[in-house]
Amino acid sequence: MNHQEEEPQIRPRGKKVMLPHGGLPEVIPQYLLNLIAQTGGPDGPIGKQFVADPQSERAGFEGVASDPLIEDEHLAAPGLVYKYDAIVDEGGTVLRPGRALWTITYTCAAYCRFCTRGREVGVPAGYTWEGNNQPHSPHLSREQIDKALEFIENEPHLNEIILSGGDPLTVHPDVLKYVLWRLSLLQEKGKLDIVRIGTRLPIHNPLAIKDTHYEAVAQLHNPRLMVHINHPQELTPEALSTLDRFRRQCGAIEMSQTVLLKGVNDTPDTLVELFREIAKQGMVPYYLYQNDPVYWAHHFTVPIREAIDLWQQVRSRLSGVAATCRFVIDTPGGYGKVPIPEGNAWKVDWEQGFTDFNGTHFELE
Ligand code: SF4
């Protein structure tokens, strides 16, 4: 970590600066406040991710909370989005098994100002607004959890679950243990092949990770920990030691996810350092995402042409494990992720756009 002269600490403003529809209050744990103070304050690469900028975040608000991945339409059970369902041919052969995203909590230890799920993450309990009159509940109840597990167990050809944000590691340890135990039983029965856990807790607050977290995750067979890391300065000794323990004690396979963010990590040097460090520390650099078009995060978006140019510079400087990272864009309409061409290996046709592996055509801008 770069121990520059420390900035005076900020005081998180909580609900006062949450988005108009109720998402993303400004909540920052002490560990992260210290890191922000050591890395340039609110305008540094860590501070910008967590300190609210209400004017920029509200500029594009038009009365609805953005859902660019079209997840709400695909809700199949409590918290469970089943968008990538199985493809089975006429003879009954499974051409592609299904995978589902399951949100057991809408709470995180800190709220990233660019969060693609800011429509639902961090909304205070019972909060209503004119665009959505359903009282909000931050966690699934035991009954809802059991209902979703029943769906997972009985849905043919669904074989992969992605626990995602909110941050599943922030739930009560007993709940985490119960959910992962039930999923591990489904793995044992041969129903589930893969369970991924998307988390940012090792970055937001590694000090909050206790023995019970490791015990819960260790129940799974080959747990995949999808760790959201955006900047090399997030990889503090505390974060690295937590990640190391998940690998050693739980056999976790750790894969990184990074969002390309203007003013945070949009230089070749920063991204090269990040992916090299992730690889060196024993993790797999997995995805660099183009920022999703949610109204509260337009000011973080690197225009796509610049982003592709940047990626080509980064890609040419990565090798081996570090180069396994792919730059992906979520296609408009929630059709899935498409890797962006790299290193001039193939040309982008700006006039024609591109066609994904399902044959669906998209414009690039
Ligand atoms: S940790 Fe993930 S889900 Fe939580 S606010 Fe950040 S990006 Fe959103």
Image (cartoon, grey):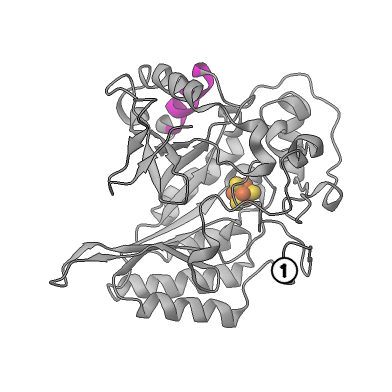
Q: Which residue is mark 1?
A: 136
Residue at 64% over, 61% down = 106
The part of the image, by quadrant, that contains residue 49 is top right
| Residue 356 spot, x, y in % from top left | 31, 42
Residue at 27% over, 22% down = 345
**The stretch drawn in magenta includes residue 80:** no
Q: Residues within 10 Å of mark 1 (few under 14, many from 20)?
A: some
Q: Nearer the viewer, residue 122 or 76?
A: 76
The local secondary structure at tag 1 comes to: loop
**The stretch drawn in magenta includes residue 276:** yes
Span colored in magenta: 268-278
Q: Is 8 situated left or right of 77 in this image?
A: right
Residue 201 visible, this angle:
no
Residue at 37% over, 22% down = 315
| Residue 301 spot, x, y in % from top left | 59, 31
Residue 12 visible, this angle:
yes
| Amino acid type of the residue tagged 1 in the rendering | His
